Amino acid sequence: MIISDTRQALQDLLTEYVYRIDADALESWLDLFTDDCVYEVLPLENIKQNLPAALILCENKRMLRDRIVALREANEYNAHTDRHVIGPLRIVAGEGGWTVECSYAVYQSDPDGVGRLFSVGQYRDHVVAEDGTWRFRRKTVIVDNYSIPTLLATPL
Amino acid sequence: MIISDTRQALQDLLTEYVYRIDADALESWLDLFTDDCVYEVLPLENIKQNLPAALILCENKRMLRDRIVALREANEYNAHTDRHVIGPLRIVAGEGGWTVECSYAVYQSDPDGVGRLFSVGQYRDHVVAEDGTWRFRRKTVIVDNYSIPTLLATPL
Amino acid sequence: MIISDTRQALQDLLTEYVYRIDADALESWLDLFTDDCVYEVLPLENIKQNLPAALILCENKRMLRDRIVALREANEYNAHTDRHVIGPLRIVAGEGGWTVECSYAVYQSDPDGVGRLFSVGQYRDHVVAEDGTWRFRRKTVIVDNYSIPTLLATPL
């Protein structure tokens, strides 16, 4: 069984991940990734058919930071609020770290206070300890309802 | 790191909070608040713009109890069922207690069994120990989709 | 207070339950039930009115297995993906085991990547230890939005 402290630390990492997106604290959200991180958003259908194409692919932290900078510049065209609700973690041992899975639902509300389901799917993450802190080495977002465009969206 | 027992007790308080609303056990739901509690529902947009106006504001437990009594009298006009799904807690130390945050989504179903997303947002609570029991000293519900009227609704 | 290891084991059982449905691993999902299990899906309205009629009732594991076999044969007509998001557990002592409750929301996405809220409600389960493993002796799914037909659906 996983040591309880590690489990809680992994839970806290996921909690911070969604909290910082929802609080629009994307710059500090970047701190949750390793320098050599991979961040990718994949449609579920591609995973089922073993097709490699990603909706979003950032192959290191610099690319991820560029994406956030671009978002800040495009901000005025996409003034919504995200709210994540995530389920319990499923934790399995991974190579040199932990593999963590959980379901997520993201709701978006616009400036008039109209909300809707935006994205639903699953996280499949690889988490490693770096200088005593758990960070995402790989974050894979598998989107079930990929018909909704996400190109200008905040991270999932 | 927060002692595990305290964390679990705070989690249990939040779990009971939503369970008792969903079970329509609003009278015992009141037991989860201190006598000098503040219960408020705020639109997210007001928080962003630093405007103080609340959708609902009860400045002590008596006001909160009055609200429940009024709800019971208006009950026949609003025969729906609530179902809360809440995310993991984000716990930070607060003055003389704990500040606890979590995302929530509330679904409402009507007597014909038709359900829809009713409210989505975040709790920001201040929890204190009173006679060895954790209770809400302040419960702030920040509603993202505030365009949906909540005046006659059960508590969020 | 419940011993922390037991709480985590009960949480893991619920996490596996929804994970295996969402991963379409229904054959290994069956392993989470005892041989003499009861699996039932009830509309909330029936519970409120104390009416016994269930939408689905399997009175042992063999009936549940038959249902999965039938689903596999009807599979081509119902090619959707489920995604469960469940809330925190409410655990109370039960006869010879534990009674565990939690809220759930299930989203379904079709092969074109269009998603929607499918079912929302509550689990009320009786969990027992069998050969050192926690399993469902009774799984009761209480559906709030029972107007949505579930006859051909995967388990909730």
Image (cartoon, coloured by chain):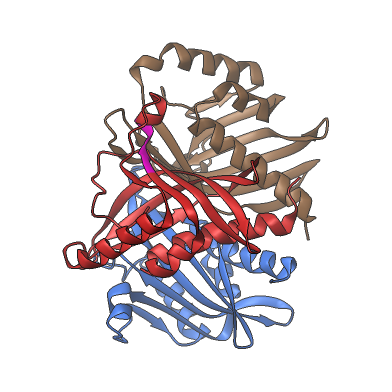
Chain colours: A brown, B red, C blue
Does A72 appear above or below B40? above
Q: Quadrant of residue A16?
A: top right
- x, y percent for residue B82: 34, 60
Q: Main secondary structure of the magenta part?
A: strand
The magenta span reads B41-45
Give the side of residue A132 with respect to residue C118, left or right.
Answer: right
- x, y percent for residue A61: 65, 20
User: Viewer-proximal residue, A25 or A72?
Assistant: A25
Residue B13 seen in render: yes
In magenta segment, residue A88: no
User: Viewer-proximal residue, B16 or C85?
Assistant: B16
- x, y percent for residue C81: 42, 53
Residue at (74, 45) in percent of width and height: A98
In magenta segment, residue B42: yes
Does A96 appear above or below A57? below
The N terminus of chain C, quarter of image: bottom right
Q: Residue furthest right?
A: A131
- How many marks can you see? 0
Give the side of residue C143 with respect to residue B90, left or right.
Answer: left
Residue at (49, 33) in percent of width and height: A22
The C terminus of chain C, quarter of image: bottom left
Does C68 appear above or below B128? below
Residue at (62, 52) in percent of width and height: A89
- x, y percent for residue B132: 66, 63
Q: Quadrant of residue B153?
A: bottom left
Residue at (76, 37) in percent of width and height: A128
Residue A156 seen in render: no
Q: Residue furthest top?
A: A73
